[in-house]
Amino acid sequence: MNHSRLASIALLTAALTGDSLRAAAPDEQPIFAGVINKIFESKCLSCHTAEKPKGGLVMTTLESITKGGESGKAGIVPGNAAESWVYGVMALPIDHDDHKPPSNKPQHTEKELALLKWWIDAGANAAAPIKDAGIPADLMPTAMELAVLKVEAPAAAARPLITPKDLDQATKDSIAAITGALGVTILQLSQSDTGLMFTAVNVADKFDDAALAQLAPLATHLSDVNLGRTKVTDAGLATLAAATNLQRLRLENTAVTDAGLDQLKGLEKLEYLNLFNTAVTDAGLEKLSSLKGLRRVYAWETKATKEGAEKLHAANPNVIINLGWDAEIGRPAITPVAAPAPAPASEPAPTTPAAEPAATAAADPEASFFTARIAPVLERTCYSCHGAEKKKGGFQAHTLELLVKGGKDSGAGIVPGKPDESSIIKRLALPKDNDESMPPEDKPQPTEKEVALLKWWITAGADAALKVKDAQVPAELN
C-alpha cells in the first residue's frame, strides 16, 4: 500500500469519525510520536511503564527511553543505533537470552526494526514531521502504516483521569545531581505519584554508605529502593530511617545485619523487604514486628530460623516470611483437590485398552525416578527455554547430564546431595521480581510440592540409577 493511498484512507477515517486533529494529516505528525513511539507502545509497554518498570526501564517518554534502565547503558544514543541498548536487544535473534520483547510477547517486524535503526542513526530527531524526516522509500510504507495505527492503551492506563503531579524543582535538581555523580537510576513512579524508584544495580560494586548518604535530600520521596549486591552496611541504613514513605526495600546480598534493621523500625508504610543472603538472625526479624504494613519478607539463606519467622508472623498475621521453598511461614495452606469419583462398577471395560497417559506409564516401579517424577516437572516448566531445541543461557534441562552441568553463567544446575548449592533450586527460590528468578513470571510455574520433591531428590543424591520402587519419598510428596 503506497503513501498516498494510506493518507487517503486516514483522511476518509477522519471525515467519518470526526478525528480531524490527529488523523487529517498523518504524515505531518512528529516522527517520534507518530511512528517510532507506536513501535514501543505496541511491543514494550506491557513491561516498561512507570507502574511496571521492568529492569528499571520506563518506555513511556523519549527521555526515559533514552536514559535506559538497570543495564547502565543508554536506551537510545542519537546517531548510533549500534550503541543504543533498546535497538541492540530488539535486533538479537529471538531465541537469544537477551532478546526483547520476550519470545512469548508480540514481536516487531523486520521493517519496524529497520525503521528504528534508521531513525537512531539519523540522529533520533523527535520533532521532524514524518513527510520531512527523510525516511528511506522502502521504509515509508511501514512508517505510514504506523502513523495511522491506533494503539490501545495498556489496561493499567484505563483508569479515571487524575491530575498529574510533578516534582518540585529542588527535588528535580537533587535527582539530576545524584544520578550524575553516582551513575544510579532514579525515576518518578508515575505522573500521578511523586514517589521515587531508586536502584544502584548498575554501580553495585562501588555503591557504599557514603553514596547512600547522598540520597538524604530525597528520603521522603523514596518509595522503592534497590540496594541489592551493593557495599551498603548497617551504618548506611541510617539514611533510610527518614524514608517514611518507603514501601519496597531490597537488601539482598549485602553486609546488613540485625543492627541495621533498627533503622527500619519507623517505616510504617514498608510492605516488602528482601534480606536474601544476609547475616540477619531471628533477633533481626523480631525488630520488624512493629511494621504492621509489612506483607513480604525474604529471608532465605540468612541465619533466621523457622521459629523466628513464626514469631514475626504471630506479631503480624499478614506477613509471609520466605525461608526457602520448603519453609514459607504465613502462606495459607493449599486445600487438596478431591480425587475424581471412581467409575461405577457396572460400567463395561473398553474392549481395547486406552493408551496409558505418560504420567501413569512413568509410575512403573522399575522406571527411573528421574524419568518418572522429575523430568515431567522440568518438561512442563523449563523445556520451552532450556530443552533440546533451545538453550537459553547455555543451559539445557532435558537430560540429567546437562541438568547437572548447568549453564554458562549459572554454575552447576544440580549438585548431588546439596540442594542449596544447586542453581536450579536457588533460582526457583528467588522472589519473582528478581531478574534471575526462574521460571519467568509468564511461564508455567512448579507447585510447592514439585519444588519440595525436586529438593528431596537432590538431597538424596540425584542418582540416575534410582528406581521408583526404591525411592523412599516422604509420604507428603507422593
Image: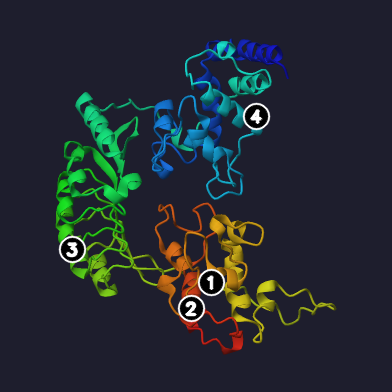
Kind of residue sitting beneath label 3: Asp
Disc number for residue 404 = 1
Residue carrying label 4 = 111
Q: Label 3, label 1: how many angstroms apart (C-alpha)?
A: 36 Å
Kind of residue sitting beneath label 1: Val
Q: Are marks 3 and 1 in contact (CB under 8 Å)?
A: no
Kind of residue sitting beneath label 4: Lys
Q: Label 1, label 2: how many angstroms apart (C-alpha)?
A: 8 Å
Q: Label 3, label 4: how many angstroms apart (C-alpha)?
A: 55 Å
Q: Earlier in the sequence, mark 3 or mark 4?
A: 4
Q: Nearer the viewer, residue 144 or 316?
A: 144
Residue carrying label 2 = 416
Residue carrying label 3 = 258
Q: Are marks 3 and 4 in contact (CB under 8 Å)?
A: no
Q: Label 2, label 4: how many angstroms apart (C-alpha)?
A: 49 Å
Q: Position of residue 119 (x, y in %)?
A: 54, 23
In the figure, is residue 210 to the left or right of 438?
Answer: left
Q: Position of residue 296 (x, y in %)?
A: 32, 57
Q: Earlier in the sequence, mark 2 or mark 4?
A: 4
Q: Label 4, label 1: how many angstroms apart (C-alpha)?
A: 42 Å
| SS at circle 3 | helix
In the figure, is residue 338 to the left or right of 427?
Answer: right
Mark 3 or mark 4: which is in front?
4
Q: Are marks 1 and 2 in contact (CB under 8 Å)?
A: yes
Q: Is residue 283 above or below residue 234?
A: below
Q: Earlier in the sequence, mark 1 or mark 2?
A: 1
Q: Earlier in the sequence, mark 4 or mark 1?
A: 4
* Outermost bottom residue: 470
| SS at circle 4 | helix
